Amino acid sequence: MLLNSIYSFHFYIEIIARLELREENSFDIIIAGGGAAGLSLAFRLANSEFANLKIAIVDPEIKQGIDHTWCSWIAEDSIFDDCATNFFSKIKFVGEGINQVFDIAPYRYRMISSAEFYRVTNEAIDNWKHITRFVNRINKIEALGDKAVVVLDNGTSIYGKNVIKSYIDDPKKLKETNKLYMDQHFKGWFIKTAEDRFDTEECTFMDFSIDQKGETRFMYVLPIDKRNALVEVAIFSNKILQHEEYDGIIEDYIENTLKINSFEITETEYGIIPMTAGPLELNQSNNITLIGTAGGGVKASTGFAFERIQRQCDAIVHCIRNKKSLSTDVFPSRFTYYDATLLHVLLSGKMSGKEVFSSLFQKNKPQQLLKFLDDKTNFWEELVIMYSTNKVKFGTSFFSAVISK
Ligand SMILES: Cc1cc2nc3c(=O)[nH]c(=O)nc-3n(C[C@H](O)[C@H](O)[C@H](O)COP(=O)(O)OP(=O)(O)OC[C@H]3O[C@@H](n4cnc5c(N)ncnc54)[C@H](O)[C@@H]3O)c2cc1C
């Protein structure tokens, strides 16, 4: 009976597909989700080299303004450098027994405001006729023979030889089904001070001096110029706070740590991202490729994603250029186990994030740590970093993480 219904469902979809499969709603590539990942990919495809491809990008909104500030450490010139608000040559780390400013050359810590990123990427997309924008929510995506069908909330179906999806269908379910899962939640205030207060060469990367409340909590400060900066709190925990609670933490930090009493708030940003080393979206088929948050773009141990997303997008473009099936296999799998281990250490309460990151920054050169957090170290370099952690706690968590994954 059940089998019959499944067969008739697929038969029905097939009939609809044949009726609707017209030129105007068939695409070579459908980019499902137009946030950081979708726009990064569309931007790469918005040029004459790919003008022979029919591309669609679907998102319920055309993103604009400040909703994210994306920082990443980069050693070379890189795509979206032109969108950067600032580059820092020095980063400050404050933790247990450590309060230090590090020169990170050859890296620079780059700060990108979503407002500029959205402006540049949207402008590029709108300039090219081979890219069609659908401002609508996707209701479902299904593999269909050698294509995939994308059904929009307004009832329209569009068909793609490839669908590249960046959003998670059901974040709540992801949280419930993954043992190794933790939210990272942020709130930031853009402040303007009455006097010059910031050094534009240096930012605060992580400051764990705030009350940890039994969780992993840190502040970061990203100066834009001498009087403007983003002051943000990041929390690793599965307990989302009320907005007033984040505001209280930020205000207290500005007044009592930065010792700034005269300032105005010009903008705010807020968000939650999933940190998990477990499976994300399951409906991957040959025609549906996952990138960004849905495709493991968010690093499970830190939440950094922007540069990882660029690596995924480069991999996809490489495949398109070389007429290969799309693949985003850019993160060596052993790093997934390292990320899972750190998540396990934190979730099991063996060590706090403050202890872990303090010990890592005390015992390793920052460049090595940044390389490690970028999944770019070799095995010997990783052994040195692992040796600087608590071997018993990390060792037992490694085995538990392997079993849980
Ligand atoms: C406040 C904040 C600060 C961050 N700071 C940093 C940082 O400094 N450095 C860093 O590397 N990372 C940072 N991150 C993490 C990461 O870079 C971002 O989460 C990044 O935006 C992930 O990109 P994405 O495209 O996967 O997801 P998103 O940017 O969230 O895009 C997903 C898109 O999918 C769309 N969508 C959702 N559902 C549907 C649907 N049913 N149909 C169609 N479209 C849909 C959404 O509208 C959205 O536009 C930060 C995250 C937050 C929230």
Image: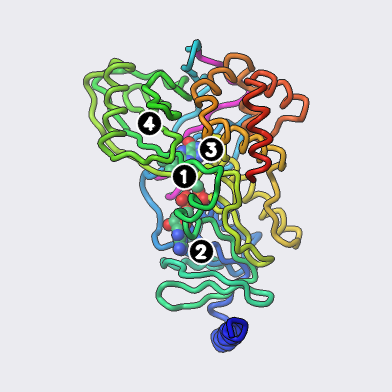
- Against 110, is 124 above or below? below
Mark 1, residue position: 273
Measured in 3D between alpha carbons, the distance from the residue under mark 3 to the one under mark 1, in whole angstroms, is 10 Å
Rendered location of residue 371, percent (x, y): 65, 29
In depth, the one of 232 and 88 nearer the eye is 232
The region drawn magenta spans 100-118
Q: Residue at x 60, y 52 (%)?
A: 279
Question: For the residue carrying disc 3, how many other residues have a C-alpha within 10 Å: few (<14), some (14-19), or many (20+)?
Answer: some
Label located before the other in sequence (3 or 4): 4
Mark closer to the observer (3, 1): 1
Mark closer to the observer (4, 2): 4
Measured in 3D between alpha carbons, the distance from the residue under mark 2 to the one under mark 3, in whole angstroms, is 24 Å
Q: Residue at x 49, y 49 (%)?
A: 175
Mark closer to the observer (1, 2): 1
Rendered location of residue 287, percent (x, y): 66, 67
Disc 2 secondary structure class? strand
Mark 4, residue position: 232
Measured in 3D between alpha carbons, the distance from the residue under mark 4 to the one under mark 2, in whole angstroms, is 31 Å
Mark 2, residue position: 57
In depth, the one of 368 and 12 nearer the eye is 12
Residue 70 in the magenta stretch? The answer is: no
Label located before the other in sequence (1 or 2): 2
Label located before the other in sequence (2 or 3): 2
In depth, the one of 280 and 138 nearer the eye is 280
Q: Residue at x 65, y 49 (%)?
A: 314
Question: For the residue carrying disc 4, how many other residues have a C-alpha within 10 Å: few (<14), some (14-19), or many (20+)?
Answer: many
**Mark 2: amino acid:** Ile
**Mark 4: amino acid:** Glu
